[in-house]
Amino acid sequence: MIDVSCAIIIDSQNRILVAQRSATMPLPNKWEFPGGKVEQGETAKQSLIREIKEELDLSIIVVRRIASNSHSYGQKEINLIPFICKISGGEISLKEHQAYKWLKSNELLDLDWAEADVPIVRDLLSTYDDI
């Protein structure tokens, strides 16, 4: 099983940042919370801070961890570890994804999500009424 951290980045207007995978990535054109694989010797939080800087050129503050989700994509199993985050610096510059959106929570289920992210979205919507 591969540990993957992801950021639920919330702005001052309570909008949530989502990113669309490029056509050349696995799970092409699917929407996800940005993040990436936890490397050996890293915590999930350290990995997330590094990945968001690499993928989006943003600095983030991790606010809290929420419930993770394990998912099998056939020959690859991942444990998706989500964190609620805020931006502390930088401007979004897409390095891997093809698009991004800032959405209100009631718009999240309208997207074609990567399967591992779906339970995270549902948990977010049912558990956190402050978003």
Image (tube, helix red, strand yellow):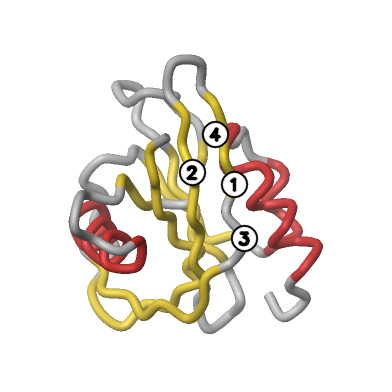
Q: Which residue is mark 3?
A: 67
Q: CA distance from mark 1 to mark 3?
A: 7 Å
Crowding at label 3, few (<14), some or many (≥20) Cα neighbours within 10 Å? few
The mark that comes first in sequence, 4 or 1, is: 1
Which of discs 4 and 1 lies nearer the camera? The answer is 1
Above/below status of 48 relative to 2: below
Q: Secondary structure at mark 4?
A: loop
- Identify residue type, mark 3: Ala
Q: Secondary structure at mark 3?
A: loop
Q: Which residue is mark 4?
A: 114
Q: Secondary structure at mark 2?
A: strand
Task: Name, please, the residue furthest toward the top.
Answer: 74
Crowding at label 4, few (<14), some or many (≥20) Cα neighbours within 10 Å? some
Q: Which mark is drawn over residue 101?
A: none
Determine whether, in the image, residue 98 is placed left or right of residue 120: left
Task: From the top left corner, tell me how far across and down residue 119 is, in percent.
Answer: 68, 45
Q: Are marks 2 and 4 in contact (CB under 8 Å)?
A: no
